[in-house]
Amino acid sequence: VQLQASGGGLVQAGGSLRLSCAASGRTFSRLMMGWFRQASGKEREFVAAISWSCGSTHYADSVKGRFTISRDNTKNTVYLQMNSLKPEDTAVYYCAADRSRYYSGTLYTAIAEYDVWGQGTQVTVSS
């Protein structure tokens, strides 16, 4: 599996963006997927995760109610819809996949649970 993130940009506070992460390979539909972010000078942090079947999602408290993770297994793509953006959401956003578990209903927030990463897309929210 290889991942390619896109959709970042500059937006004013209160605005919206939708990130996309396109995956190659035949196993995407079996995998848990996640979004992480890393602000300048800070550690990478969990944002959201979604199970292989879209049956389960999990969010960081800081984005709950504002961000929505989804996926389209027919298009090998996972999305992150970001609404009501705040300046503190400014970061490089990364999509990630966990290739070690197929059809897992358990969602993980730890970076170490994901072994494939996209290249990142910059999101900048101006005040």
Image (cartoon, helix red, strand yellow):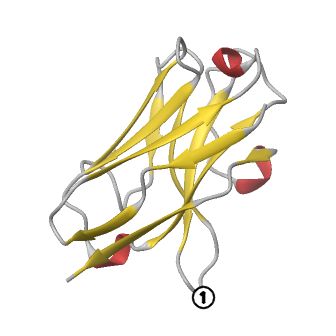
Quarter where residue 27 is shown: top right
Residue drawn at 15 percent across, 65 percent down: 14
Task: Give the side of residue 13 with respect to residue 44, left or right.
Answer: left
Task: Report the label total.
Answer: 1
Q: Is residue 116 above or below residue 17?
A: above
**From what the image shows, is residue 112 above or below residue 13?**
above
> In which quadrant will I find the C terminus?
bottom left
Q: Secondary structure at mark 1?
A: loop
Up/down of 45 relative to 102, above or below: below
Q: Position of residue 82 (x, y in %)?
A: 30, 51
- The extreme bottom residue here reads 41
Q: For this rendering, which residue is in front, 48 or 119?
A: 119
Relative to 86, 28 lies left or right: right
Identified at 51% across, 32% down, the residue is 78
Quadrant (top left, top right, bottom left, bottom right) of the N terminus = top right
| Residue 63: image location, x then y, percent | 34, 56
* Front residue of this view, candidates 66 and 16: 16
Q: Which residue is mark 1?
A: 41
Residue 19 x, y percent position in the rendering: 42, 47
Q: Is residue 88 above or below residue 17?
A: below
Q: Residue furthest left?
A: 14
Q: Amino acid at mark 1?
A: Gly
Q: Residue 12, percent across and down?
A: 19, 72
Instruction: Please tell me which residue is depicted at 81% across the width and 44% down the height of the picture.
Output: 115
Q: Residues within 10 Å of mark 1 (few under 14, many from 20)?
A: few
